[in-house]
Image (cartoon, helix red, strand yellow):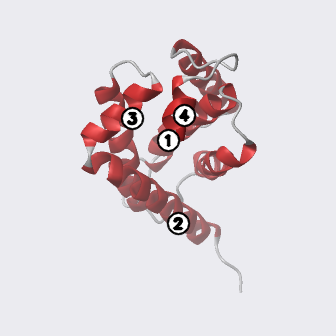
Amino acid sequence: MVISTEFFLFLVRVFLGVLMIYHGWPKLADLKATSRYFKKLGFKMPSVVGLKVSLLEFAGGVLVILGIFAELIVAAFVFEMLVVVFMKLATKKLFIDYSYNIALIVIGLLIMFLGAGSLTLIPSNTGFLLNWPIVITAACVSRLVVYLNGFSSNSKSKFQSASEG
């Protein structure tokens, strides 16, 4: 039995969308707790960051499943996961602590580079986003976000304290 590329991309998109919704709903359901968490992490304007992350994960997950602007939303989600990975690297976390995030990045890159497939409600053509210079720039910017928020490998950071407690 051979699975078509379009059906495979649909399955990958649904899988990633479900994961995004699963992790976004608790953040969206309790924005005060989400804001407190991002404040503990040391983010400036934690309420805004918490709301954006919650909406990206929950509403973005729904849109990814439906195939509406999927590549663009997944690109934003990959950027979010890059920030998380760099935060965990900066605090010298073990690979097991960020391997899930790396897996989500790889799944996201798959959708970004192969597209959402034809089984979508609104086919998109976001090829301008889907190239290596943009991915490398996103990685550099996400590292800069981590640096500017004071996450360093020299001391126990706010991120490390927040994730332990």
**Who's the residue at 52% across and 55% down the image?**
116
Q: Nearer the viewer, residue 60 or 132?
A: 60
Q: CA distance from mark 2 to mark 3?
A: 33 Å
Nearer to us: label 2 or label 4: 4
Q: Find out whether the residues at labels 3 and 1 contact each other: C-beta distance under 8 Å.
A: no
Q: Nearer the viewer, residue 125 or 149?
A: 149
**Is 74 placed above or below 146 here?**
below
Q: Residues within 10 Å of mark 1 (few under 14, many from 20)?
A: many
The residue pinned by badge 1 equals 77
**Who's the residue at 45% across and 21% down the image?**
42
Q: Residue 143: x, y in percent?
A: 62, 22
Describe residue 159's horizontal placement relative to residue 73 as left or right.
right
Q: How many marks?
A: 4
Residue 10 is tagged as 2
Q: Residue 62: x, y in percent?
A: 36, 57
**Is 19 placed above or below 59 here?**
below
Question: What type is the residue that disc 3 sits on?
Answer: Tyr
**Who's the residue at 58% across and 25% down the image?**
142
Residue 141 is tagged as none
Q: Residues within 10 Å of mark 3 (few under 14, many from 20)?
A: some
The residue pinned by badge 4 equals 79
Q: CA distance from mark 4 to mark 1?
A: 5 Å
Q: CA distance from mark 1 to mark 2?
A: 17 Å
Q: Secondary structure at mark 3?
A: helix
